[in-house]
Amino acid sequence: MKVFEYGDPSASTVLIQMVDDHDLEGIENEFDAVRKAAEGKLRLIAVKVSDWNTDLSPWQAPPVFGNEGFGSGAADTLEEVKKLCRDRDRTYYIGGYSLAGLFALWAAYQTDLFRGAAAASPSIWFPGFTDYMNANKIRAKRVYLSLGNREERTRNPVMATVGEKIREAYSLLKEQKTACTLEWNPGNHFREPDLRTAKAFAWVIRDEE
């Protein structure tokens, strides 16, 4: 995994985001948007994964589009991410878009290392994930969820459940007294992922009310 860093290396607030090449194209625009919305110094560590469907998946699952299924490499990926968060004098937030958003949610169930999880348009349709949420307690204090208002309008039967699943996830988190929000953005899954991710990070790092 390659690591790209943005912002102030001395910042006490550190954002961790799993990315691919497409994410990196908009990462500077994303970071600028977060910085404008937040107060204080920020540092963003973008971690590029080599195999998106394997490295970010918590368990194996069959293909939902094309022929490529999902592996179970999230645990190994998280161990690498933890190495970037060794300075306990800093506050860490994990986030991401699409499957990286799902990984961020899952990671927040595995460790209390992350104060917040910023899941922008997460792949919450992932088989068995809301069942996992129902059976476990998230360890992050703040969780942001979002979805495009056209994302559930798809012919793919698995991905069409994304609206139902995100509502279920939000309800589960609220029932468990987790500080969270669910925001609906205009458009489909591919509209403004950089700005959606920026909004997600901006929400989780703001001071608790």
Image: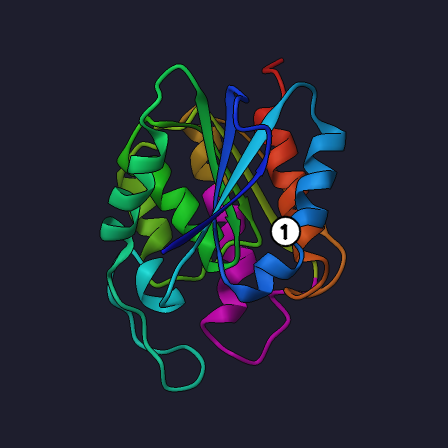
Is there any visible trace of residue 46 in the rendered image? Answer: yes
- Left or right: where 32 falls relative to 19: right
As drawn, is 197 to the left or to the right of 63?
A: right
Q: Residue at x 23, y 50 (%)?
A: 75
Residue 170 rendering spot, x and y as whole percentages: 51, 40
Which residue is at 65% across, 32% downward?
202
Name the amino acid type tagged 1: Ile
Residue 95 image offset from top left, x and y in percent: 50, 42
Q: Dot 1 corresponds to which residue?
A: 27
How many marks are shown on the rendered structure? 1
Q: In front: 32, or 182?
A: 32
Q: Residue at x 76, y 56 (%)?
A: 186
The answer to whether residue 184 is seen in the rendering is no
Q: Residue drawn at (41%, 43%), measured in percent from left and top?
A: 105
- Residue closest to the eye, 63 or 172: 63
Determine whether the residue tagged by mark 1 lies in a helix, strand or loop.
Answer: helix
Give the extent of the magenta segment.
150-169
Report whether 181 appears left or right of 116. right
Asked if residue 114 is among those painted magenta in the image, a careful observer would answer: no
